[in-house]
Image: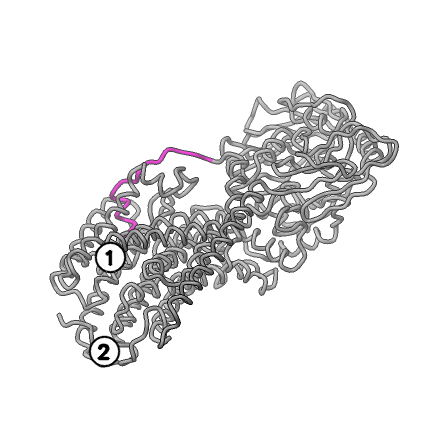
Amino acid sequence: MPTLEAVQLPPAAPAVAAGTGRPVARASALAALITVVAVCAADAVARTFPFGRHTRGVNDLGNQFVPFHAHLWDLLHGRAHGGALVNWQSGYGTSFLPDIGTYLGSPFALLVGVFPREEIDLAVYVITVLKMAAAAVAMTVLLLTLRPSPGRRWAAGVLGAAYALCGWSVIEATYNTMWLDGLIAFPMLCLVGEWARARRHALVGPVVVALAWTANFYTAYMATIGAGLVLLLRLFLEETEVRARVWALARAAWTSALGIGLSAPILFTVFLGTKHAYPGWSKEFQPVPWSDFLARWLPATYSFSSPALFLGTGALLLAGALAFNRAVPGRERYAWTGLALLVALSFQWKPTHLAWHAFQTPNGSPYRQTFVLSGILVIAAWICVADGLPDRRALLGGGGVLAVIAGGAAFSELVSPWSYPLFFGGLAAALGALLVAGRARGRRAVALTAVLLLAGAQTAQAAVTVAYGDRERLHRLDSYPAWGSAHDAREAAVAGADGWPAYRTDPGRRQITGNDPLLLGGEGASYYSSLTPDVLTRTMTALGGGWTSRGRSVQSLDNPVTDAVFAVGARVRADKGKAPTVTRAPVPPLVTVRGGDGTPTYGKSPFRNQESLLGARVYTLPRTLAEGCAAGQEAFLWAPEYTGWARLGSGKWVEFRGGAPKRRAALAPLGVSTGPSSGVTLRPAYKKARLGCLDRGALTAAVDHLRTTGATDVKVTDSGVRAVLPAGASGTAVFAMPRIAGWRCAVNGGGAKPADAYLGLVAVRLTGSASPSTVSCDFRPPGLKAGSAAGAAALAGLIGTGALLTVRKRRAGAPKHP
């Protein structure tokens, strides 16, 4: 088969340095165009937002990432309650810097600020597509840096798009938007390795590393491993002297250390935030059957527990053909093929699986490193085609590799009716494109036909895979609606009732997402994050709170006692199909005083636990459900493990959704009792439910006492609380916020020390004073001080590197021809 040396798009152009110039820009633009067209066309065909009625907001995308981006919008526009250190809206006050590092560290996230807030779903979608396009561009530039190949830049563009549209990207990362930063990071970190090898960009390299690790440290860790493997292979292939290899590795290590050090203020806080988080789900790694492993190389397959290895048949054909392509030196083709095989095998062996995931099997998808293998395969495909088209022998070998994949996948149930037609159709198009390209001989129209065949096949396969994934996710995962009229109504109700910091406004027990306070406004208990504090979940559980996601998605608790304790003075209620209403109640200030010297502890009953935190007895606890509550008392049912329905007398049915370890049902109000006839009915029956009867008069008296003895003035900042207590206040000042790690408090301007805890809340011991006392608490997330010191050291190292380079340049003298 003829070579492709004469094929150029555009026709003959002056030689350009790798990674620069118009030809590379055009190849990068082609990669971005294919990526954007494939994703948007697929979503349009699937009638998925923003092109149709189906929501994109499945799983954590709608439940976490959209609300977090909405809160970022509020921060950028000065509307948020809290700042970079404290988020006052979620979980009754929680650390926010670790969430920034986990969900919002990407520079792309800042783009939300240019969209209207009610278009937050569109903003996240645009960011997602732009990240994928950026990954395509970054990979294209990397390929042309590894092997410039002026006559085949169009192929680099198509392969760059193949990387950006890999199965991991379009099936998994598309609804885990922060993972897409890892898709960008891998080729960028490989470029940093090339710069270290070539003694270039010594100051830019650490900045690129820092951006990658700040954007999403989790996938950056995997991308760094992958880039390290690529660098080692490149040194093995390109450098002959041991000394040169050692110095190149030293430069790469120094660059990485500086970059990671620059990101330390975020990294340290995220790491320690994880240590203080409620423990998530952990399980033993089990490799998937090889038939399923091979099936995921095909288009239009879906699974949450196997590696999404789809890459596009054209790219796979070239990657498979590399080992048989005699036009590539044997040492090079066997090295790249071997690296790809070793990385693929590492997915199925527990020790290497753990190494890819920082030695802890992740919650959910266990193959989050798949994008690294996709990148290595794309590089292998480029090496195969960069210096000339593979001959018939090589294509037969590549076809044999694809035959093994297709044959092994036949035993898997993951294969869809679309998989094989798309797979073989893409193979035919790829072979046709290579055949046409080989006969171009400088003819622009023929070369363009080859580009269209290869790009069209990649676009079609990826588009169908995206559309298939859109449909399957809606069928298999929880979904959350895009912003609409229901959001408008809730947001308006919350805004109209807002009184922060005099009191909190809870956006409601009936949730749209697990992060409604971030999405809709207000200051409630609801909070869903990988960093949900352990103390928050345990405190709310002790008080009768409910949760999902194995304790990391804490729900609002609709209860007047806990509302009083946490100063929730306004609560939004929105029954299905009805306009939201606001219920108000007088509540104590954010800082109150409890008398006594003892330190109470929680027991098994949430009713008694609420009373301990309130400081007064307000519940009567009947021995049986049939006994019911006295007339005028409010009935509350506690059945945390129950799944079913309950009602008081002939009142309305209330749903409970328990079921450990995934869910816990919240203590719920059933209504006001009319007397002995108001017994509680459960469907289905359940013997472990407990009833609490609230005396509103006793609660009112308790609230009045706390208001009288509590703070007379409270000021809240983005990182702390300051309160003035009445003269004679003694005992314990209790702040209505969970005692998460990082709070330090002082009394009357004295020295600050770690805050005390009072039943899970921030507390300060008082000595009693004849004059009003001032108590203040400030928050600094654990790890920020040490991280800032490490960041400063890295910055000093970067400045020192720059100074050293400047001195060496001056000593060497300016070049005659810059």
Side of 385 where 529 appears, left or right: right
Residue identifier under label 2:
446
The residue carrying pointer 1 sits among few (fewer than 14), some (14 to 19) or many (20 or more) residues within 10 Å by Cα, namely some
Q: Secondary structure at mark 2?
A: helix
Please give the name of the residue rendered at 58% of the width and 44% of the height, measured from the top-left corner.
785
Q: In the image shown, does 217 or 647 lie closer to the viewer? A: 217
Sequence-wise, the earlier of marks 2 and 1 is: 1
Q: In the picture, residue 248 is in which quadrant?
A: bottom left
Q: Is residue 339 visible?
A: yes
The residue carrying pointer 2 sits among few (fewer than 14), some (14 to 19) or many (20 or more) residues within 10 Å by Cα, namely some
Residue 132 in the image: x percent, y percent?
41, 60
Q: Which residues are magenta?
A: 281-297
In which quadrant is the N terminus drawn? bottom left
Please give the name of the residue rendered at 25% of the width and 46% of the height, measured from the top-left corner.
342
Residue 744 in the image: x percent, y percent?
67, 37
Please give the name of the residue rendered at 51% of the width and 42% of the height, measured from the top-left corner.
530
Amino acid beneath label 1: Glu
Q: Is residue 287 magenta?
A: yes
Residue furthest out toward the front: 811
Amino acid beneath label 2: Val
Q: Is residue 749 magenta?
A: no
Residue identifier under label 1:
239
Residue 172 in the image: x percent, y percent?
40, 51
**Marking on residue 213:** none
Q: Is residue 594 above or below residue 159?
A: above
In which quadrant is the C terminus drawn? bottom left
Q: Is residue 45 visible?
A: no
Camera-near label (2 vs 1) is 1
Q: Is residue 474 above or below residue 568?
A: below
Q: Is residue 452 above or below residue 253?
A: below
Residue 540 in the image: x percent, y percent?
62, 33
Residue furthest out toward the top: 623
